[in-house]
């Protein structure tokens, strides 16, 4: 009877949100988490009237923005969880104010804008890059079909994870462990 009650409470409350480690997610989890994050970011920008200087349309193409927004979402999920303390929402808003400043910095550094995007520039270190590292093409391109680009990005990430997973199974890739 007691175990049944505990299970019922657990089912009702659900799992406590955990941080997401984008480096270690399985292919299906990457897809699920990206789609959930995208929906939440869309809600966030509408709910709080955030400009592109804080959340640009191509945020998903910039790991620094993906990690920041993901952490912010997980914090929000925890803060608004039925099990959260009453002051968690206030704590989230305080952290959100700080995160907005960081997001502005990330957007400035990475160079994405409302109408154009380019990959984040990485400064190569003399004699400090891996032998197979090649400098990215950082040419700007116009932002035309954001949703189409996002879905293509999700497919790319899932395919990349499947390839990494297959390589680990074959025993040929130990770099991502």
Image (cartoon, rainbow, N blue to C red):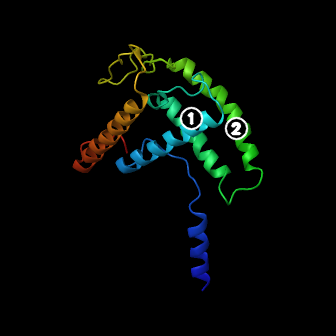
- The residue depicted at 46 percent of the width and 46 percent of the height is 33
Q: Quadrant of the C terminus?
A: top left
Numbered disc 1: secondary structure? helix
User: Residue 151 location, x and y as percent?
Assistant: 37, 36
Q: Are marks 2 and 1 in contact (CB under 8 Å)?
A: no
- The residue depicted at 51 percent of the width and 46 percent of the height is 20
- The residue depicted at 56 percent of the width and 69 percent of the height is 11
User: Residue 54 location, x and y as percent?
Assistant: 60, 26
Q: Does residue 73 sit above or below 48 in this rendering?
A: below
User: Residue 85 location, x and y as percent?
Assistant: 74, 56
The disc at residue 68 is 1
Q: Is residue 60 left or right of residue 78?
A: left
Q: Which quadrant of the view contains residue 143?
A: top left
User: In the rendered image, which residue does mark 2 sit on?
Assistant: 95
Q: Is residue 109 left or right of residue 162?
A: right
User: Residue 93 location, x and y as percent?
Assistant: 72, 39
Label 2 packing within 10 angstroms: few (<14), some (14-19), many (20+): some
Q: Does residue 149 sit above or below 75 in this rendering?
A: above
Mark 2 vs mark 1: which is more N-terminal?
A: 1
Q: Residue furthest left?
A: 170
Closest to the observer: 42 or 140? 42
Numbered disc 2: secondary structure? helix
The number of callouts visible is 2
Gap between marks 2 and 1 measured at Cα: 12 Å
Q: Does residue 112 sit above or below 78 in this rendering?
A: above
- The residue depicted at 36 percent of the width and 50 percent of the height is 28
Q: Quadrant of the N terminus?
A: bottom right
Q: Residue furthest bottom?
A: 1
Label 1 packing within 10 angstroms: few (<14), some (14-19), many (20+): some
The disc at residue 128 is none
């Amino acid at each position: 009877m007691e175990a049944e009650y505990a299970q019922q409470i657990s089912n009702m409350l659900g799992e406590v949100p955990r941080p997401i480690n984008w480096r270690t997610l399985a292919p299906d989890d990457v897809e699920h988490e990206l789609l959930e994050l995208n929906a939440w970011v869309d809600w966030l920008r509408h709910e709080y009237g955030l400009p592109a200087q804080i959340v640009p349309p191509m945020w998903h193409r910039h790991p620094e923005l993906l990690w920041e927004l993901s952490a912010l979402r997980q914090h929000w999920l925890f803060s608004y969880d039925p099990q959260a303390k009453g002051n968690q929402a206030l704590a989230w808003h305080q952290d959100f104010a700080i995160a907005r400043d960081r997001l502005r910095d990330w957007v400035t550094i990475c160079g994405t804008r409302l109408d154009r995007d380019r990959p984040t520039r990485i400064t190569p270190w003399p004699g400090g890059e891996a032998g197979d590292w090649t400098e990215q093409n950082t040419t700007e391109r116009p932002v035309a079909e954001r949703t189409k680009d996002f879905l293509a990005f999700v497919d790319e990430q899932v395919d990349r994870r499947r390839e990494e997973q297959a390589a680990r199974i074959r025993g040929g890739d130990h770099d991502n462990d």
